[in-house]
Amino acid sequence: MTEYPIIIKGAATISANIINGVGRLKWCVREAPMGETDTGWTFLSEVDDEEFLAREGNLKPIDYQSVIEMEPAVLWIYQLPIGTDIQLVIEKGKKYFVDTQTGNKVNI
């Protein structure tokens, strides 16, 4: 387990496909938090589809810090505003986020 100098507190929702290593984290959506400890973030994998996401138990609550341990790039998006809908792109060994609606690279 890697230690990060910044500790992020709060919960997120994540696809079981990411947790189980079936798919890598790709989609990151932030909605209004549903409680005091909820960050509002949901993380989906590149293999998730509507049928998978509709099945009970395939979206799981998780500590945001655990998401960072699975994909360190999400450390940098934590404070993006509610309504954020982005995807993680990996090209030639580099990672960056793209706005899902506009296709523009997100400057963090």
Image (spheres, helix red, strand yellow):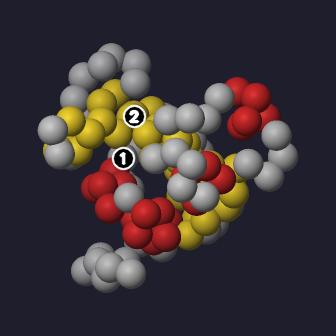
Question: Considering depth in this image, is 42 or 84 the residue closer to the camera?
Answer: 42
Q: Secondary structure at mark 1?
A: loop
Relative to 74, say whether 47 is above or below.
Answer: above
User: Hey, what amino acid is under mark 1?
Assistant: Leu
Work out whether residue 30 can be spotted: no
How far from the left and from the top, in percent, is residue 96?
23, 41
Relative to 19, say whether 65 is above or below.
Answer: below
Q: Quadrant of residue 50?
A: top right
Query: Who's the residue at 61% across and 65% down the image?
Result: 62
Relative to 72, say whether 93 is above or below.
Answer: above
Mark 1 vs 2: CB contact within 8 A: yes
Q: Determine the residue located farthest toward the right in the rendered image.
A: 56
Q: Identify the mark at residue 86; answer none if there is no mark.
A: 2
Query: Who's the residue at 73% across and 48% down the image?
Result: 58
Q: Residues within 10 Å of mark 2 (few under 14, many from 20)?
A: many
Q: Earlier in the sequence, mark 1 or mark 2?
A: 1
3D distance between C-alphas at marks 1 and 2: 10 Å
User: Hey, what amino acid is under mark 2?
Assistant: Ile
Q: Is residue 58 left or right of residue 39?
A: right
Q: Residues within 10 Å of mark 1 (few under 14, many from 20)?
A: few
Relative to 101, say whether 82 is above or below.
Answer: below
Query: Who's the residue at 17% across and 44% down the image?
Result: 94
Q: Indicate the quadrant containing the N terminus: top left, top right, bottom left or bottom right.
A: bottom left
How far from the left and from the top, in percent, is residue 11?
58, 65
Q: Is residue 85 left or right of residue 20?
A: left
Query: Who's the residue at 82% across and 40% down the image?
Result: 55
**Residue identified by numbered label 1:** 80
Total numbered labels: 2
Question: Considering depth in this image, is 65 or 2 the residue closer to the camera?
Answer: 2
Of marks 1 and 2, the one in the foreground: 2
Work out whether residue 77 can be spotted: yes
